[in-house]
Structure formats: C-alpha cells, structure tokens
Image: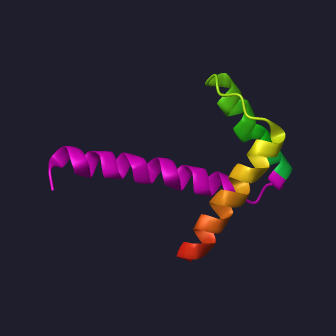
C-alpha cells in the first residue's frame, strides 16, 4: 500500500469515528442533531430536518450491520 493511501485511510477513519461519536454521544438526540445541522450550515450545507432524520436513520442502520 502506498503511504498516501494509508494517510487517507487514517483521515477517513478519524472523520467517520468523529461522526459516529457525535451520533452515539450521551446527549439527547435532538440536541446532537441540532449541533450537527449548525456545523453543516456553517460549512454552507443546507439540510432540511426531514433529510437529517433520514441521514441519521441510514447511519444507524449501517452501524448496526457492523456491530
């Protein structure tokens, strides 16, 4: 494996880990989702509430498949 692939894999894993950590954090789900939407909005990404719920459900399904 080339060093650049290893570096990109580590960075991708860190981002995925951070996302999962936010979703399973001991805060209320609504508060976490609100914070995620604020961060996305700061980055210029607009996501409607219904779409956010769909995204969360999809991520949960993927996590459950791997556990």
User: Looking at the image, what colour scheme do you see?
Assistant: rainbow
Please name the residue shown 68% across and 55% down the image: 23
Q: Quadrant of residue 61?
A: bottom right
User: Is residue 27 rendered to the left or right of residue 45?
Assistant: right
Q: Is residue 21 visible?
A: yes
10 left or right, relative to 21? left
Residue occupying the far bottom of the picture: 67
Instruction: Give me the residue at 70% from left, 40% from top.
Output: 36
Residue 24 in sight here? no
Q: Position of residue 49 (x, y in %)?
A: 82, 40
Task: Describe residue 7's horizontal placement relative to residue 52 as left or right.
Answer: left
Q: What is the x, y in percent for residue 29?
A: 81, 54
* Magenta portion: prevailing SS class: helix
Residue 59, by quadrant, is: bottom right
Quadrant holding the N terminus: bottom left
Q: Is residue 39 depicted above or below 31 in this figure?
A: above
The magenta region covers: 1-29
Extreme-left residue of the structure: 2
Q: Which is nearer the eye, 48 or 7?
A: 48
Q: Position of residue 24 (x, y in %)?
A: 69, 61
Marks counted in the figure total: 0
Going 85% across and 49% down the picture, which residue do you hit? Answer: 30
State whether residue 51 is above or below residue 23. above
| Quadrant in which the C terminus is drawn | bottom right
Q: Nearer the viewer, residue 37 or 62?
A: 62
In the rendered structure, the answer to whether residue 16 lies left or right of residue 43 reads left
Whether residue 5 is in magenta: the answer is: yes
Does residue 54 belong to the magenta stretch? no
Q: Position of residue 13 (x, y in %)?
A: 42, 54
């Amino acid at each position: 494996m080339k060093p650049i692939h290893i570096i990109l894999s580590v960075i991708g894993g860190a981002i995925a880990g951070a996302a999962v950590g936010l979703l399973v954090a001991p805060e209320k789900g609504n508060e976490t989702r609100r914070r995620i939407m604020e961060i996305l909005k700061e980055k210029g990404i607009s996501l409607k509430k219904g779409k956010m719920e769909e995204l969360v459900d999809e991520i949960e399904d993927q996590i459950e498949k791997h556990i």
